[in-house]
C-alpha cells in the first residue's frame, strides 16, 4: 500500500475508478494511437490538438494525486478541517463522525463502505484497514462499483 494515497476522509485513492480503471485505459489508448501513427495526424482531426496533449498527460503522468498532495476539490470541507486540526485521517479525530460526512455516508451519492472502513481504521488501526484496501484493489473493487451496487 502506498500511504500517500490515504485520504483525510478515509478513502483510498487507488480504489478510485479514475486510478484503477481510467488511467490504465488512457495509457493503453495512447500507446495504441501512437503505434497507429495518430501523433502525426491528430491535429487534423477536430479537437485533436486539445485531446492529444490531454491523453498524453494522462498516459505519462497519471490523472491525479491524493488530496493530501493537492489533488481533488480544494474546497473540500473534510480536507480543510483535517488540515486545520492536523489530523492524518478523520477517523482518528475526536469529533468524528461530524456533519461534514453526511453526504459521504449516503449510499446514492456517497461511499457506502466508508463508515465501516473508518470504524475498522479506528478499532483495528491502519494495518487492518490497509489490508482491506489492498485486498479490494487486488479483486478489482472501485468505489464507483460500490456506489452502483449499494456497498
Image (cartoon, rainbow, N blue to C red):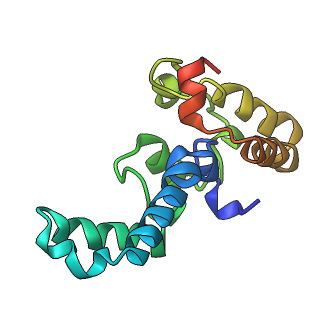
Task: Decide if residue 13 is on the left or right side of residue 25.
Answer: right
Q: Can residue 128 be seen at all in this image of the molecule?
A: yes
> Which residue extends farthest front?
36
| Depth order, front residue of 131/99 | 131
* Residue drawn where x is 73% and y is 33% of the image: 117
Q: Is residue 147 left or right of residue 94?
A: left
11 over 97 or under it: above or below:
below
Given residues 106 and 86, the one toward you in this image is 106
Picture quadrant where residue 10 is located:
top right
Q: Position of residue 119 (x, y in %)?
A: 76, 30
From this view, report whether residue 30 is shown above or below residue 112.
below
Residue 66 visible? The answer is no
In the image: residue 45, left or right of residue 34: left
Q: Position of residue 123 (x, y in %)?
A: 85, 34
- Say left or right for 24 vs 87: left
Q: Quadrant of the C terminus?
A: top right
Q: Residue at 50% of width from left, 59% of height from top?
A: 23
On screen, residue 15 above or below 120 = below
Q: Position of residue 13 (x, y in %)?
A: 59, 51
> Farthest residue toward the bottom?
40
Q: Which quadrant of the figure contains the N terminus? A: bottom right
Rendered image quadrant of residue 5: bottom right
Tell how many labels.
0
The residue that appears at 28% across and 74% down in the rendered structure is 53
Quarter location, residue 48: bottom left
Q: Position of residue 126 (x, y in %)?
A: 81, 49
Q: Residue drawn at (61%, 23%), measured in percent from left and top? A: 112
Amino acid at each position: 500500500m502506498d500511504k500517500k494515497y490515504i485520504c483525510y476522509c478515509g478513502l483510498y485513492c487507488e480504489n478510485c475508478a479514475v486510478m484503477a480503471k481510467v488511467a490504465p485505459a488512457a495509457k493503453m489508448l495512447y500507446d495504441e494511437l501512437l503505434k497507429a501513427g495518430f501523433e502525426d495526424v491528430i491535429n487534423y482531426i477536430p479537437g485533436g490538438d486539445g485531446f492529444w496533449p490531454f491523453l498524453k498527460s494522462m498516459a505519462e503522468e497519471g490523472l491525479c494525486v491524493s488530496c493530501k498532495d493537492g489533488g481533488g476539490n480544494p474546497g473540500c470541507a473534510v480536507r480543510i478541517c483535517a488540515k486545520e486540526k492536523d489530523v492524518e485521517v478523520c477517523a482518528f479525530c475526536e469529533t468524528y463522525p461530524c456533519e461534514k460526512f453526511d453526504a459521504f455516508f449516503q449510499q446514492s451519492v456517497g461511499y457506502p463502505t466508508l463508515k465501516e472502513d473508518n470504524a475498522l481504521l479506528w478499532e483495528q488501526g491502519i494495518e487492518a484497514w490497509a489490508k482491506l484496501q489492498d485486498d479490494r484493489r487486488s479483486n478489482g473493487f472501485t468505489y464507483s462499483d460500490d456506489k452502483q451496487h449499494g456497498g
